[in-house]
Image: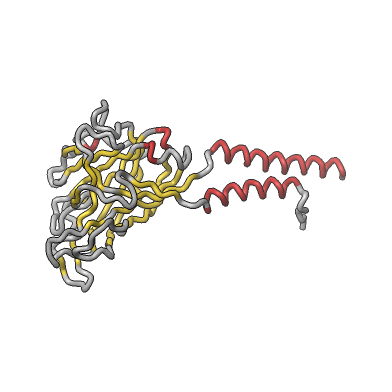
Amino acid sequence: MTRLRTSDPRRRAACGLACLLMAATTAPAAVIFSPPGDGVSGNGQGDAPFARVGDTNGNRYQQIYSSSFFAGVGPQQLITDVAFRPKQGAFGTFIGSSLTISNLIVQLSTTARNADTDFPNGLSGDLALNPGPDATTVFSGPITLTTTRQLFDTGVGNFDFLITFQTPFLYQPGLGNLLLDVIIPAGETISSRTATGATARAFPQLDTFTDGFPSRDGTASATDANLLDGLTIGRNSTTGVVTRFSVTAIPEPATLAVFGGVALAGALGYRRRTKAMA
C-alpha cells in the first residue's frame, strides 16, 4: 500500500482542495433582512405571503428583493431558508399561535425585474412574467408554522415562521434581483390553532413594510388571491412582508477549477518523479 508523506505533493494538493471544499460547506451563514431590518418593526401587518384561515381559493404571492441586499456575502451563494415575523394583533383570543397549510410551494429565481417601482421593468401584476429562467422549487408539501408570540405582545417579534428549504437555491446577485414566489394551490386548506390546541379563526398576521409610492426601498410585491380562474393576473404593490434569509457564500467554479488543477498537477508531477527514480 502506498502511503503519502506530509511532504508528498499529492497530499498537499489534496489537502488544499479538501480544505476549500470544507470551507464552502462549513462557512457561517450570513443573515439578510429586508427593510426595515432586524429589530425594527414594520408599519403594517397582513396575511401575505400566505392566505386567510379557511380560504380555499388558492393564493400566489411574489416579492422581489434587490440584489444589493446580498452583495456583501459574495458573488455566489446558497440560500437555505426564509423566515417571517409574526405580528400579533389585539383582536381577541380567537387568534392562533400556529398556521397549517396542506400544501405550500415556495420557489426562488433570479429575475430581471426592477426592485423599485418607479423604474422601468418593475414587478408586473401578471405574475407569470416575473420569475427568471432559473426558477427553482425550494420547498413543496404540507407545513405547520408556529410562533411563541402571545396575544397583546408588544415590541418587535422574532422570525418564528421559518421555512427550511428542501433544495437550497444557488443565487448570484450579479445576474439580477431575487424573486420569492409563494403558492398555495386552489383547494388546499389553511387552518390555525391556539397554544392549547383549540381551533382558531385566524393566525398572527405578519409584519409588513410600505414605503409609499414610488418605492425605492429595494422591495415590492405582487399578489393573485384567487387561483380558481387559472389566470395569473393579480396586482402589484409597494408593500412587502419583512423577510429574513439565511445564505452561505460558496467558492466560484473558477476557484474550484484552479484548486482542482493544482491537485491534478501535483499528482502528475509526483508520478513523473517516481518514474524517473525507478
Measuring 25% from the left and 57% from the top, which residue is drawn there? 86
Tell me, what colour scheme is on the image?
secondary structure
The answer to which of 79 and 184 lies nearer the viewer is 79
Residue 192, position in %: x, y? Answer: 19, 64
The answer to which of 268 and 36 lies nearer the viewer is 36
Residue 269 in view in this figure: yes
Specify the farthest residue to the bottom.
196
Residue 7, position in %: x, y? Answer: 78, 49
Measuring 78% from the left and 53% from the top, which residue is drawn there? 5
- In the picture, measured across the screen, residue 14 lies left or right of residue 105, that is right
Quarter residue 108 falls in: top left
Residue 168 in view in this figure: no
Residue 132, position in %: x, y? Answer: 33, 36
- The answer to whether residue 5 is above or below residue 233 is below
- In the picture, measured across the screen, residue 260 lies left or right of residue 60, that is right
Quarter residue 211 falls in: top left
Residue 161, position in %: x, y? Answer: 29, 57
Question: In which quadrant will I find the N terminus?
Answer: bottom right
The answer to which of 264 and 64 lies nearer the viewer is 64
Question: In which quadrant will I find the C terminus?
Answer: top right
- The answer to whether residue 270 is above or below residue 175 is below
